[in-house]
Amino acid sequence: MYGIYEGGSVIAEFVAPFAIRSNHPVFTSDTFSLSRYISRRTAQRWEIDTHLSPLSANAQDLFVHLVTKGYSTSFTILTPQNYGVILAKTSNSTPSASGSLGTSTVNIVQGSNNGFIPKGTFIKFSNHAKIYMTTTSLNDSPVSSTLSIYPPLRTAVSSTSFVTNNVQMTCFYDLETLTGMSYSDGILQDVGQVRIVEAI
């Protein structure tokens, strides 16, 4: 179950319609000859547009969360994995990896991964909060191997473990999100669409 995470459990579950996007600023310009010049910034964050499962008897937890976090205090979510990843992934290990700042690959320590991690899996390294996505798949690692990730590493990792299950992302509510409560039929709290942005 993916959603807003507090006190060791999900207090509000994400439901469809749901969208997660990569905000990676790109600037383009066309010349008179229609050649296109593209400049891509290094900054990147994940952004989520989602609805939350309507709540009734336990709606107070979400209400307090929305009001107290507002737009200025970060909070944690359990990051949704792609459904194809959920079906294909067999690894429950926490592999160890190393990589330099700014690189798009990490070296996987021999024998630290048991099972299959498909490309498109969200991962998080233990030494920093940024969320990454694998762009190649990883099989069992009886020998040292490499794993490609997106975006490039924001912090170097050295024999650092990473998780693929219950990946926690630190976020903020975007300004379009209602920081209060709204009831759809008198007893079901439904705040409508919520926009969440990764804290970087």
Image (tube, helix red, strand yellow):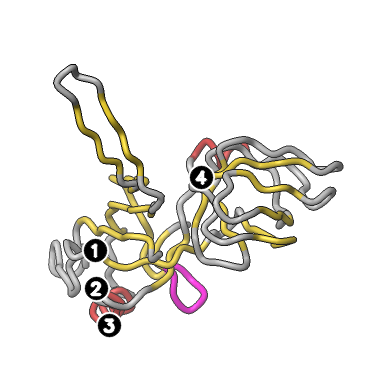
Give me the disc on residue 174.
Answer: 1
Q: Is residue 104 above or below residue 70?
A: above
Q: Which residues are magenta?
A: 5-10
Q: Is residue 196 above or below residue 105?
A: below
Residue placed under numbered mark 4 in the picture? 150
Q: Considering depth in this image, is 84 or 159 the residue closer to the camera? A: 159
SS label for mark 1: loop
Q: CA distance from mark 1 to mark 3?
A: 14 Å
- Mark 3 surroundings within 10 Å by alpha-carbon count, few (fewer than 14), some (14 through 19), many (20 or more): few
Q: CA distance from mark 2 to mark 1?
A: 6 Å
Q: CA distance from mark 2 to mark 3?
A: 9 Å
Query: Which amino acid, by three-letter code, is at mark 1?
Result: Asp
* Label 1 or label 4, whichever comes before in sequence order: 4
Labels 2, 3: front one: 2
Residue placed under numbered mark 2 in the picture? 71
- Where is residue 117 drawn, in percent x and y? 65, 42
* Label 1 or label 3, whichever comes before in sequence order: 3
